[in-house]
Amino acid sequence: MTTFREYRAAQLHGFVADRNVPALPTDAVRFQGERAGLVSRAVAAIIDVVLIFAAVLATIAALWMLSFIIDPTNTGNLTASVEAAADRQTRIPPAVAMVAYGYVLNVLYWTAFWALSGRTVGNLVMGLRVVNRKGAHPGWFLSLARALFCTIFPIGLIWVALSRRNKSVQDVVLRTNVIYDWVVGIPWLKQGDDAEDLRAERGGIGDEAHT
């Protein structure tokens, strides 16, 4: 993967992209490819946590309704109603179990999204992407390590405000970065014969459009 800043610099040295980069808002161009700050990263993390919290609540609701399908409660008289009220307490999973479930779900969510695309839903909303030290998507192992680190030690994000390179504790230890990236796909750059072919192809398309 090529960062946007590398993409612009490479174009000046004769490289040609295999596809065009989507247009960016004017205000976003100067930030594209730069390391993200604390506020945008915190907002992205909050969005992700809210999504996980909603998933946990949905799971609790689903288990609660499923329990009544599997084992209906007779509420035909007062005694049965009292017993049913007590029974409802056992139909909802223990709080400790649901908190643990939320942590595991959060780790799996961050791991999968960072490994596959470098960004979660929160990252996508805020225009962020997690990359490794080479600027590529972090692999599965690195994504898992980062997800565990961020889940267990979320306060490490505060170091971004103190770091001159906008790095969290997790970034420093794992050698990752979080950059601004509003482009869904960065084009690969070509040089030599492939670049000449692309120039010729685009020139021909442009000539046809003008005629």
Image: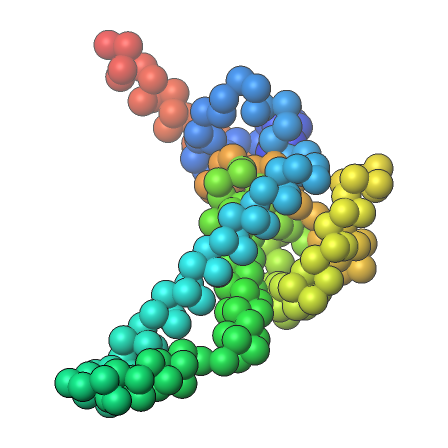
In the rendering, at what x and y percent does residue 129 appear? 58, 46
Residue shown at 35% from the left, 86% from the top: 87
Q: Nearer the viewer, residue 76 or 14?
A: 76
Residue 175 visible to an observer of this rendering? no
In the image, residue 159 lies at what x, y percent?
80, 47
- On screen, residue 150 versus residue 77, left or right, reads right
Q: Height in image: 151 above or below 206?
A: below
Residue 101 image point, x, y percent: 51, 74
The answer to whether 81 is drawn above or below residue 118 in the figure is below
Q: In terms of depth relative to the viewer, which is nearer, 120 or 118?
A: 120
The residue shown at (55%, 72%) is 99
Q: Is residue 108 left or right of residue 6?
A: left
**For this view, does 199 lie left or right of residue 62?**
right
In which image quadrant can residue 2 be found? top right
Residue displayed at 59% across by 54% down: 137
Residue sitting nearer the eye, 10 or 63: 63
Residue at the spot 32% in from the left edge and 76% down from the top edge: 64
Q: Quadrant of residue 139?
A: bottom right
Locate the C terminus by quadrant.
top left
Q: Is residue 109 above or below residue 101?
A: above
Residue 108 point in image, percent of width and height = 53, 69
Q: Residue furthest top?
A: 211
